[in-house]
């Protein structure tokens, strides 16, 4: 099992729209493609409150690649994403890390 930690630096003022898109659109697509989200976090105290963190669980890198490719090429997702960004991009930049749990981690 591996985990993917994704960090979205949100375009100023767009956090509510991004959270709404995840809640009402993205998560439904992810269910279709077998994504397993572990959690989502926003910053309460820190350098910036315009950052969204989330973590996904994967069986393997091959599992991740297959599911991401299918999701990102889905024409319905592409259309819905474009609709949510008609007034500009919601995310300024994205970074991600693939993590492997230690032998003593609660998540395996």
Image (spheres, rainbow, N blue to C red):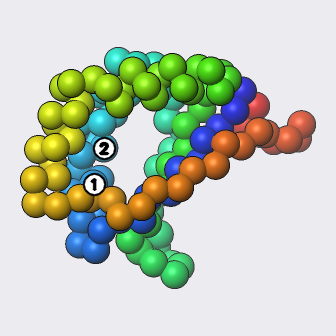
Residue 15 x %, y %? 29, 63
Taking the spot 51% from the left edge, 20% from the top edge, the residue there is: 66
Q: Are marks 2 and 1 in contact (CB under 8 Å)?
A: yes
Quarter that holds the C terminus: top right
Q: Which residue is the extreme one toward the bottom?
A: 47
| Within-10-Å neighbours for mark 1: few <14, some 14–19, many 20+ | many
Separation of marks 2 and 1 at Cα, in angstroms: 6 Å
Quarter that holds the N terminus: top right
| Residue 107 shows up from this direction | yes
In the rendered view, tell whether residue 23 sits above or below residue 86: above
Residue hosting label 1? 18
Instruction: Give the number of the disc on residue 76.
Output: none
Residue 9 x %, y %? 42, 65
Q: Which residue is the extreme one toward the right?
A: 103
Q: Is residue 65 left or right of residue 3?
A: left
Residue 85 x %, y %? 16, 52
Q: Nearer the viewer, residue 14 or 37?
A: 14
Residue hosting label 2? 22
| Within-10-Å neighbours for mark 2: few <14, some 14–19, many 20+ | some
Taking the spot 10% from the left edge, 60% from the top edge, the residue there is: 87
Which quadrant would residue 11 be assigned to in this image?
Answer: bottom left
Q: Is residue 38 left or right of residue 16?
A: right
| Residue 16 shows up from this direction | no
In the rendered view, tell whether residue 101 sits above or below residue 94: above
Residue 72 x %, y %? 35, 30
Which quadrant would residue 55 be assigned to in this image?
Answer: top right
Taking the spot 46% from the left edge, 56% from the top edge, the residue there is: 94
Secondary structure beneath label 2: helix
Secondary structure beneath label 1: helix
Which quadrant would residue 81 be assigned to in this image?
Answer: top left
């Amino acid at each position: 099992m591996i985990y993917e930690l994704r960090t979205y630096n949100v375009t100023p003022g767009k956090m509510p729209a991004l959270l709404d898109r995840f809640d009402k659109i993205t998560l439904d697509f992810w269910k279709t493609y077998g994504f397993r989200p572990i959690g989502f976090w926003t910053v309460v105290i820190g350098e910036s409150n315009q950052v969204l963190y989330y973590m996904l669980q994967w069986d393997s890198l091959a599992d991740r690649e297959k599911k991401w490719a299918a999701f990102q090429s889905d024409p319905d997702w592409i259309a819905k994403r474009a609709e949510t960004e008609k007034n500009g991009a919601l995310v300024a930049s994205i970074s991600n890390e693939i993590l492997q749990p230690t032998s003593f981690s609660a998540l395996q």
